[in-house]
């Protein structure tokens, strides 16, 4: 057991060390001279193997430096995959926690404001944004409010309509997961202007169901804990229970989800870059560097170095998740 614990400790330190190297490589691109730009070719050194004086890790068939591509590819990972994973995890955790806590009947809204908004929306839809439409929407909203207060019996005034939060979130998850993620991302990216921001949004908005499902399941367990039920019995507002008690209990779950999300989105981003989709042509990526190996099948270094960077980063994140899980289990 002691040897196994020592081995796991060394693996955790190695994983942290590799991730520190990736972060350092990404930060180094801020101070590298313009001559190290990954899109500047050296026409006198086409498809050169590693060990050259000017190109330590060789060049691709266009004469672009492989080491520069790896460094700027690490920067792309930090600018795209990591923020997308954080955004997807936070969005999925927020929606999943709401779905798990409120269910389909715990969150209610008064009928009066709903009727007012519905009447105003219908008038604006039929009459568009014109003076007549605005006036009709105003009078229609006031009329709906009077109906809610005095008409249709007294029950319309005090009626509370349940909001099926759980059904809505599960429906969105079912819609997004019914299509293979790679196919969905390819279809969306194909009609978008290539940019880092667009890629970040696409990855975030297609990956959040993973964290939403896990957080929802955990919230279903948390809302049945004695201190949550005691707070509900004392009449503590739901938002206060969520913020002060339920969300802090999700800290370990969300912390474990983040490395998993980063690893998955690194794989997805490199796959899209390998296919030439999503990022602008001038943006370096490990997947795009790996794709240049198709132009020269004898250039083994174009496969070895970017593939090793991808593999080691994913394995390091996996080990980080394992170490985090072991630590939370001890606590």
Image (tube, rainbow, N blue to C red):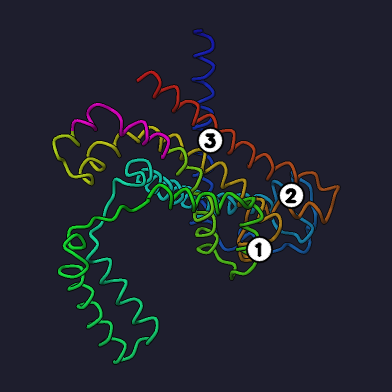
CB of mark 3 within 8 Å of CB of mark 2? no
- The label nearer to you, 3 versus 2, is 3
Mark 1 lies on a secondary structure that is loop
- What is the magenta segment's predominant secondary structure? helix
Q: Is residue 179 above or below residue 8?
A: below
Q: Is residue 211 above or below residue 205?
A: above
Q: Identify the image quadrant of the C terminus.
A: top left
319 sits to left or right of 229: right
Percent of width and height locating residue 284: 62, 58
CB of mark 2 within 8 Å of CB of mark 1? no
- The label nearer to you, 2 versus 1, is 1
- The label nearer to you, 1 versus 3, is 3
Farthest residue, direction front:
153
Depth check, front residue: 113 or 186: 113
Residue, disc 3: 317
Percent of width and height locating residue 303: 75, 45
First in sequence: mark 3 vs mark 2: 2
The Cα atoms of the two marked residues, 2 and 1, are separated by 14 Å
34 sits to left or right of 9: right
Percent of width and height locating residue 229: 23, 31
Magenta residue check for 299: no
Q: Give the magenta range.
A: 216-230
Q: Residues within 10 Å of mark 2 (few under 14, many from 20)?
A: many
> In which quadrant of the rendered view does residue 251 lie?
top left
Mark 2 lies on a secondary structure that is loop
Residue, disc 1: 39
Depth check, front residue: 92 or 226: 226
Depth check, front residue: 151 or 18: 151
First in sequence: mark 1 vs mark 3: 1
Mark 3 lies on a secondary structure that is helix
Residue, disc 2: 58
């Amino acid at each position: 057991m002691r040897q196994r614990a020592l081995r796991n400790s060394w693996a955790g330190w190695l994983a942290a060390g590799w991730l520190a190297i990736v972060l350092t490589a990404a930060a180094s691109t801020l101070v590298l001279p313009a001559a190290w730009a990954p899109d500047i070719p050296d026409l006198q050194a086409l498809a050169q193997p590693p060990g050259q004086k000017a190109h330590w890790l060789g060049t691709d068939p266009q004469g672009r430096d492989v080491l520069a591509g790896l460094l700027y590819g690490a920067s792309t990972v930090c600018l795209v995959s990591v923020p997308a994973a954080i955004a997807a995890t936070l969005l999925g955790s927020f929606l999943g926690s709401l779905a798990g806590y409120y269910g389909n009947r715990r969150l209610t809204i008064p009928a009066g404001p709903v009727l007012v908004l519905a009447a105003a929306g219908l008038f604006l839809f039929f009459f568009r944004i014109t003076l007549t439409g605005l006036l009709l929407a105003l009078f229609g909203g006031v009329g709906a409010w009077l109906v809610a207060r005095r008409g249709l019996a007294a029950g319309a005034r005090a009626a509370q309509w349940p909001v099926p939060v759980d059904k809505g979130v599960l429906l969105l998850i079912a819609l997004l997961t019914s299509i293979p993620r790679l196919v969905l991302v390819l279809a969306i990216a194909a009609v978008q202007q290539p940019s880092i921001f667009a890629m970040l949004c696409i990855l975030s908005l297609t990956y959040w169901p993973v964290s939403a499902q896990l957080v929802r399941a955990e919230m279903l367990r948390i809302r049945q804990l004695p201190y949550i039920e005691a707070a509900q019995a004392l009449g503590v507002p739901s938002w206060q229970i969520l913020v002060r008690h339920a969300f802090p209990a999700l800290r370990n779950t969300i912390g474990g989800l983040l490395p998993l999300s980063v690893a998955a989105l690194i794989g997805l981003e490199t796959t899209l870059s390998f296919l030439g989709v999503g990022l602008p042509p001038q943006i370096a990526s490990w997947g795009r560097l790996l794709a240049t190996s198709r132009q020269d099948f004898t250039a083994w270094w174009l496969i070895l170095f970017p593939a090793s960077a991808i593999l080691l980063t994913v394995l390091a994140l996996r080990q980080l998740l394992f170490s985090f899980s072991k630590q939370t289990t001890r606590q």
